[in-house]
Amino acid sequence: MERHRQALKAQAISTEGLSLKVSGQCMLPVFDDGASLTFHARRLYIPGDILAVLHEDAVVRVHRLLFVAPRFRPSGLGFYALCCADDSERADLWCRVERILGRLSHVDGQPIPIRKTNDVVLALSTFASHIKRRIIKRP
């Protein structure tokens, strides 16, 4: 699994970037099922970025970054990211930032804007809703 992650990350760092084909419609209208996506690794990701993340089940998911925070786990302190599909109210599980492969840079060969203010606002409001649901569920 670690070799697989390193190989994908190396491709994302390259000038050509990491190319993936989409299976699913969870990020409509940004891209549709079957779209060809290109990702490039960055040093910094901010809420609203669309990321490729290699999850524990060896599946690469392409979702929007909601938040990054330090968290303590049995394996130690680390930074974790919380992502979510645009068509979902439920966020993914927290994942280590090392599992982020890159940020979306091209859809079907066309460059996308670096960042839009409404993408950041959407990500932060989704994160706030996620936190609100977590707080309300707790006794």
Image: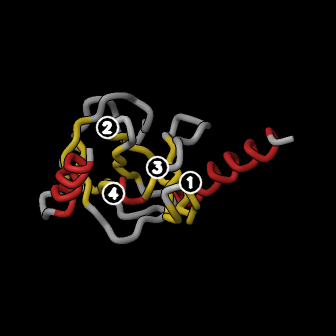
Return the disc, 3 or 1, that comes first in the chain's sequence.
3
Residue at left offset 56%, top offset 54% = 123
Query: Measured from the top left, where is residue 71 in percent x and y?
Result: 58, 61
Q: Earlier in the sequence, mark 1 or mark 4?
A: 4
Viewer-side label of 2, 4? 2
Give how far apart the Cα atoms at labels 2 and 3 are: 18 Å
Residue contact at pointers 3 and 1, CB within 8 angstroms: yes
- 2 vs 1, front mark: 2
Where residue 67 sits in the image (x, y, percent)? 55, 59
Alpha carbon of mark 2 to alpha carbon of mark 1: how far?
Answer: 25 Å
Circles 2 and 1: CB distance less than 8 Å? Answer: no
Could you tell me which residue is drawn at 36 percent across and 64 percent down? 114
Label 3 belongs to which residue? 64
Q: Secondary structure at mark 2?
A: loop
Query: Which label was assigned to residue 58?
Result: 2
**In the rendering, which numbered label is found on residue 103?**
4
